[in-house]
Amino acid sequence: MGVDFRLGNASAMPFPDATFDFVFCCAAFKNFADPLGALREMHRVLTPGGRALVVDLRPDVTKDAVAEDVERMGLGRLDRVMTRFILHTMLARRAHTRAEFEQFLPQTRFVSFTIEQTPLALEVDMFAGGAGSGGAPARDGGAGATASRGGAGAPKPGSGSEA
């Protein structure tokens, strides 16, 4: 499998429609100037039935969660101090909340999504739906843990379905 890295705008990706089965965004979403545009672009470049996963820092991350994660990195003392400071202050400040994702996602064409929280991050798993799913925006799933339009091919929360 080849990997091709390209510099670009997350809200205007340099790829044709329906190019990828899976889109993964790790530790970058908080840096996007147009987060809703980035989510819409993720959907645009996914094939029918494709999946997107965003994993990014929580804005309410605790110092303990950051310290535990940084400790696993095996950094030297000064690097540990700087990394803890940057993660907990500068980067966490720019991170998006669960509520923000719950507002963004119904404005996209994803047919379902789940949002899981770890002590350090939010994991937002989005499903593009099959060819017959209509592509209508996802509905809010009440408390926001899961939202789904249902429809053909939409995975059930916790089913472990992979695209």
Image (tube, grey):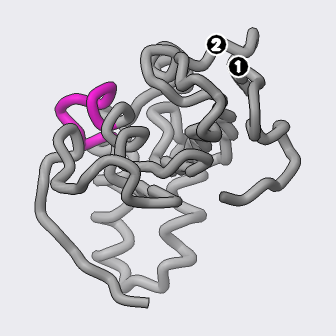
Q: Residue furthest front?
A: 132
Q: Secondary structure at mark 1?
A: loop
- Residue visible at 77% across and 24% down in the picture: 150
Residue 48 in picture, x, y percent from top left:
55, 46
Asked whether 145 or 148 is in front, the reply is 148
Q: Relative to 118, is 85 on the left or the right?
A: left
Which amino acid, mark 2?
A: Arg
Residue 161 in picture, x, y percent from top left:
79, 54
**Disc sitting over residue 139 in the figure:** 2
Q: Relative to 47, is 76 on the left or the right?
A: left
Q: Is residue 17 above or below residue 6?
A: above
Determine the CA span between mark 1 and mark 2. Answer: 6 Å
Picture quadrant where residue 30 is located: top left
Of labels 1 and 2, the one closer to you: 1
Which amino acid, mark 1?
A: Arg
Picture quadrant where residue 26 is located: bottom left
Q: Earlier in the sequence, mark 1 or mark 2?
A: 2
**Disc sitting over residue 149 in the figure:** 1
Give the magenta range: 30-38
Q: Residue furthest bottom?
A: 1
Q: Residues within 10 Å of mark 1 (few under 14, many from 20)?
A: many
Q: Is residue 160 above or below residue 70?
A: above
- Residue visible at 58% across and 23% down in the picture: 134
Where, quadrant-wise, is the N terminus in this rendering?
bottom left
Q: Secondary structure at mark 2?
A: loop
Q: Are marks 1 and 2 in contact (CB under 8 Å)?
A: yes
Mark yes or no: residue 54 visible. Answer: yes
Residue 3 in picture, x, y percent from top left:
32, 83
- Residue visible at 66% across and 58% down in the picture: 163
Q: Relative to 49, is 87 on the left or the right?
A: left
Residue 37 magenta-highlighted:
yes
